[in-house]
Image (spheres, grey):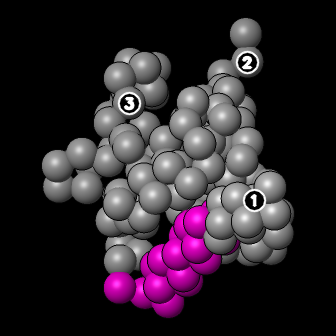
């Protein structure tokens, strides 16, 4: 049996089961609780509270960085995949992410250029989805 580090476990087990970069970001954000603590019962049982929290925070920061480095057209496609995985439409998914913005930004990244960039990306995706709906209705 190979022992994995907590970060390897998050990446290779937990996040690999989630389709879409934006869905991964939303999931990791949902694990933040009071006082910005990350909680994941299974990870804590296997790796302990501190190692689990460090790994989840590192993964959250890494996924946010990946989102910020991804071109907008690729994120548009990812939005469709992430929303399908989440069981809601792309427009609703984008709007929900904007509504949960504060939890999407890893602790310590608030009020940084990265958080401003993420906010702009989410606004752009939401606007593109709203306009896609208008363009589809007007050409039908």
**Nearer the viewer's eye, disc 2 or disc 3?**
3
Residue 40 screen position, x and y as percent: 38, 30
Residue 83 screen position, x and y as percent: 62, 42
| Residue 13 sits above or below residue 38 on the image | above
Mark count = 3
Residue 71 screen position, x and y as percent: 80, 74
Residue located beneath label 3 in the image: 40
Residue 45 screen position, x and y as percent: 38, 18
The image quarter containing residue 47 is top left
Disc number placed over residue 2 in the picture, else none: 2
Residue located beneath label 1 in the image: 136
**Nearer the viewer's eye, disc 2 or disc 1?**
1
User: Label 3, label 1: how many angstroms apart (C-alpha)?
Assistant: 41 Å
Q: Secondary structure at mark 1?
A: helix
For the residue carrying disc 3, how many other residues have a C-alpha within 10 Å: few (<14), some (14-19), or many (20+)?
some
Whether residues under marks 2 and 1 lie with C-beta atoms below 8 angstroms apart, the answer is: no
**What residue range appears in magenta?**
111-130
Q: Residue at x 70, y 59 (%)?
A: 137
Q: Secondary structure at mark 2?
A: loop
User: Label 2, label 1: how many angstroms apart (C-alpha)?
Assistant: 51 Å
Sequence-wise first label, 2 or 1: 2
Q: Does residue 74 show up magenta in the picture?
A: no
């Amino acid at each position: 049996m190979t022992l994995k580090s907590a970060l390897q476990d998050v990446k290779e087990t937990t996040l690999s089961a989630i389709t879409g970069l934006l869905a991964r970001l939303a999931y990791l954000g949902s694990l933040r609780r009071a006082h910005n603590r990350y909680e994941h019962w299974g990870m804590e049982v296997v790796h302990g509270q501190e190692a689990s929290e460090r790994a989840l925070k590192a993964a959250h920061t890494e996924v946010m960085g990946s989102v910020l480095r991804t071109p907008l057209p690729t994120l548009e496609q990812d939005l469709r995949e992430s929303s399908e995985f989440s069981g809601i439409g792309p427009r609703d998914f984008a709007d929900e992410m904007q509504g949960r913005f504060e939890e999407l930004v890893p602790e310590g990244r608030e009020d940084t250029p990265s958080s401003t960039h993420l906010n702009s990306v989410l606004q752009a995706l939401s606007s593109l989805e709203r306009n896609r709906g208008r363009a589809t209705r007007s050409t039908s």
